[in-house]
Image (tube, grey):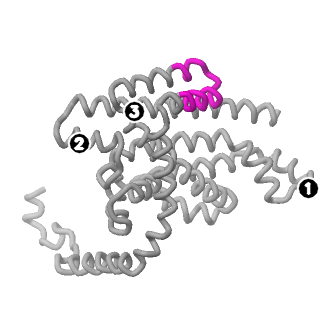
Amino acid sequence: MALACDLLPQSLCKFPSLDSGTMLAIRKTVDTGFRDFVRAYGTFIDALTNPLQWFLNWLEGLFVGSPWILVLAAMVAVVYFASRDAKITIGTALAMLAIGVVGLWQDTMIALSMVTVCTLISIVVGIPIGIVMARSDRAQGVINPILDVMQTMPSFVYLIPVVMIFGIGKVPGLIAVVIYAVPPMIRLTNLGIRLVDKEVLEAADAFGSSSWQRLKNVQIPLALPTIMAGINQTIMMSLAMVVVASMIGVGGLGRNVLQAINNQFFTVGFLNGFALVAIAIIFDRTSQAYGKRLQKHSEVIHG
């Protein structure tokens, strides 16, 4: 290859990229514009994010400040009523007790509060966008490329604009996690609604259902198993992103993992990683079991 380039003109061997001066000018223009935007609208942005800060602090205080036995009982109850599976319920109790025994209960509660808020925001944002995509091919054509970029962009890259706009702290980390975790929620909501049988929709139209009634009473109930799969994926991605978001001020298990990496503490990293895996398995098994129950229920209705 080197010999070929020796024989050919340099213009054919070296890609005609922009010179360093032009690239520097472009970067300065974009970065300066970003900073000017933040200076101009910083107060307004802070006012928008204050409710998120308040809700996250309240939930974290509730999880951390409540007696551990009450939190464990509530968690076990939620898992049982969602899954109706004794094995998953017992496994949840044992995993949470093991987390407490190794001294990671408080950090786990902080991580749980972050994942809970991120999941709720992803649901509130993702389901309406998924519905819009399901009802409009044009909207789907516009939103799909955006979701492709969001899902393929390296997770660390999300931290750059988030830190530039919101600074360092829990809320910027929360926003970065939501951006990373919301695409599955949108995609699977869209898919679930589009997979509803046309015959069922025709029957709803025959009974005189309006567009809203058809969506509320037919499409969303039948799409719930697929939507639950989207929630499951959102939770998994939130847990994965919590470790990355610890770089900008998110506490809990993610911060411990980051410190373990920096200081080469194998045991600390392993224990905190175990706690994250345990939470992920609990959420995964519970949401899957609940999705299967919804699937059986929808099949009975459809039948």
* Badge number at residue 208: 1
What secondary structure is found at the residue carrying circle 1?
loop
Say which residue appears at 65% left-offset and 24% top-offset.
84
In this view, the mark in front (3 or 2): 3
Label 2 or label 1, whichever comes before in sequence order: 1
Say which residue appears at 26% left-offset and 75% top-offset.
27
Asked if residue 275 is among those painted magenta in the image, a careful observer would answer no
What secondary structure is found at the residue carrying circle 3?
helix
Say which residue appears at 35% left-offset and 50% top-offset.
250
Q: Nearer the viewer, residue 295 or 179?
A: 179
Horizontal placement of 70 versus 295: left or right?
left
Label 2: which residue? 259
Horizontal placement of 127 versus 105: left or right?
right
Q: Residue 284: x, y in percent? A: 52, 33
The answer to whether marks 2 and 1 mark residues whose Cβ atoms lie closer than 8 Å is no
* Badge number at residue 105: 3
Task: Inspect the image, locate mark 3, and give the three-letter code of the amino acid beneath it.
Answer: Trp
Task: Inspect the image, locate mark 2, and give the three-letter code of the amino acid beneath it.
Answer: Gln
Mark 1–mark 3 Cα distance, whole angstroms, equals: 54 Å
Label 1 or label 3, whichever comes before in sequence order: 3
Magenta stretch, residue numbers? 73-90
